[in-house]
Image (cartoon, coloured by chain):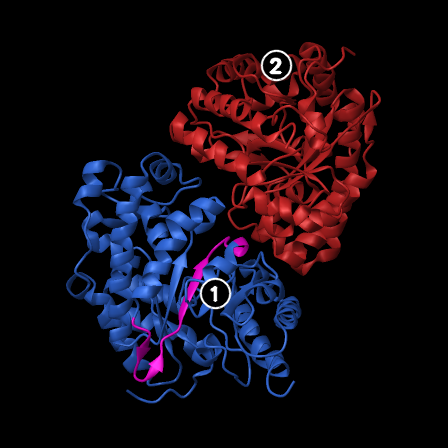
Chain colours: A blue, B red
Amino acid sequence: MTPLANDTLLRAFLRQSTPYTPIWLMRQAGRYLPEYNATRRRAGSFLALCKNPDFATEVTLQPLERFPLDAAILFSDILTVPDAMGLGLYFAEGEGPKFERPVRDEAAVARLDVPDVGAQLRYVTDAVTQIRRALGGRVPLIGFSGSPWTLACYMVEGGGSDDHRTVKAMAYGRPDLMHRILEINARAVTDYLNAQIAAGAQAVMLFDTWGGSLSAAAYRTYSLDYMAQVVRGLVREADGRRVPVVLFTKGGGLWLEAMAATGCDALGLDWTIDIGEARRRVGNQVALQGNLDPTMLFAGPEAIRAEVGRILAAYGHGAGHVFNLGHGISQFTPPEHAGALVAAVHELSPAYHGEA
Amino acid sequence: MTPLANDTLLRAFLRQSTPYTPIWLMRQAGRYLPEYNATRRRAGSFLALCKNPDFATEVTLQPLERFPLDAAILFSDILTVPDAMGLGLYFAEGEGPKFERPVRDEAAVARLDVPDVGAQLRYVTDAVTQIRRALGGRVPLIGFSGSPWTLACYMVEGGGSDDHRTVKAMAYGRPDLMHRILEINARAVTDYLNAQIAAGAQAVMLFDTWGGSLSAAAYRTYSLDYMAQVVRGLVREADGRRVPVVLFTKGGGLWLEAMAATGCDALGLDWTIDIGEARRRVGNQVALQGNLDPTMLFAGPEAIRAEVGRILAAYGHGAGHVFNLGHGISQFTPPEHAGALVAAVHELSPAYHGEA
């Protein structure tokens, strides 16, 4: 493999010194970019885009052509794993993801098994290898997966949900079934991320989009414990470098100490927590990624720059901050505002690095 | 007025000793009750139900006939205030609240003014008086309003929103307009709650449903500061008794200390925070209301009882806890499960009161 020209992201995830604060954007390859929409039209559908390594490579690299981002992130969907379990992922027009065969009863839970990642998710690992080649060492490539609980939410609900009452009714009423699903998901996610690392992912992130819908106690039992199991099972080194692991629970600001104790390298923060307060709470245990409110990008470049300044100052001097949004970039974002964000981070952040 | 037979709620809100932990349920008069749906059909629509004091009184009392709840809460909508400002509230079938004339530009903001509560919201204060009479001193009546920020979310978005990008773009891009709206809302909400107190409300609650969608910094500026202004403007005594004020920001678990510092009497908690941790953080400053996950009511009575036990134990011994859900009860809840919840709280809580 070509040596990495810009390793700022990997260093920041490990709290090593960097000349500036690296930045990437959750969902940076997405519908706010006209070139992404053009490729998607050529592919025919979102799933076709995900399942074809050529298309996935193309869209993964698109935001890097526009903006001097410090990382690429694998273009894929968080529901590839349950799809590989045979649940039949599909996207109804304008409705978000759905499963043809949701896991709602004891028989469906009994049928569930860990997929053969090498065979059934080959299109993902092929994309990882191809993206690494296409990147040619410019910036590192981040792999990712949905968390065991977040996957279970979709698997049991059969799609998105406002209140997750089907999956929570199972968790609270039939914890035995819920734990069986989560155990399988944790093993599948571990295999999946290890396969991505073997194929070339240089950091990996667990997206726990729905952990924040749980009570504090249920979060430990149904989400965090299984993420910790995944973290313990990951291969943490590749090409002689540590592969950082990032945990992101949306709405998880109350639980940072417990998340940091899983042994991960970094925590993703949504925008509801002050990043300075988060840093005081986790100390030197982990790096922090975040945490601009994505809707801030609907304000103008000056407001964006001011907010970047506020967040950098809140984190303060020193290593361990990876700038990002607190959630995925909205499809309605003007691309030039994303550009203004990247520029502001690169321009304002060197003051917080180097000699104090 | 008849003396209050059960003042457990008012005492608990003021952290005075009680023989057990009082309970009421957010949205306790609602669609999960067949008798509510029957009255609503007779009224013709949700808004007709809200705007007619006879119907509002009828549905307010319905849950008290079924369950030995320790409070009644005024049946109304959180959007009565912007409706009284002339924005034209309506409910599209299956779509939630909408405004005919959203407040989207400088001209619309300039036209906005504090409504004449005595005239335009007379139907609400009439309902309060009538409900007090119908209650005959059984339990206290809670009045309420949406928070200035939460009202602004609906006023600017023109209805519900997943990401609140219109209102946030205004807050971040044109803070002058946003502050003018919030200033008007804060004065209107103060007048509105004071009118409810004058008409007989014995406690009042501010519902800040969307404060949790803001960043920590923006929450202070756009939501909390205006709630604090409302709290300062409220009449805090009626019939020789203190009128407790409760603040509830959904998703506000990170900001409890700042919320407690507004001078309110109690904080509502959603289910994402451990209530014991919340108590340690706010100390003796305020009482705490909460915090069962409403979807827990989809599990059976035994699971509900176990979770009630867990929450009571987490709060621990002593005064200052009002049991509630962490958010409104779901329309799909089996009514007998709500009954199991009320029974469990009344049965298990005396152990946490009296001599330690």
Q: Is residue A45 visible?
A: no
- Callout 2: helix, strand or loop? helix
> Range of the magenta residues?
A235-254
> Which quarter of the figure is the C terminus of chain B placed in?
top right
Instruction: Name the side, left or right, on which B110 lies relative to A216.
Output: right
Q: Position of residue A306 (x, y in %)?
A: 66, 69
Query: Any magenta on residue A244?
Result: yes
**Where is mark 2, residue-wise?**
B55
The foreground one among B228 and B308 is B308
Q: Circle 1 is placed at which residue position?
A: A267
Does residue A345 appear anywhere in the picture? yes
- Compared to residue B241, the image places residue A157 above or below, namely below
Residue A252 percent across, percent down from the top left: 50, 54
Residue type, numbered disc 1:
Leu
Percent coordinates x, y for residue B343 in the rendering: 50, 21
- Give the x, y percent position of residue A69: 46, 77
Q: Is residue A7 left or right of residue B212?
A: left
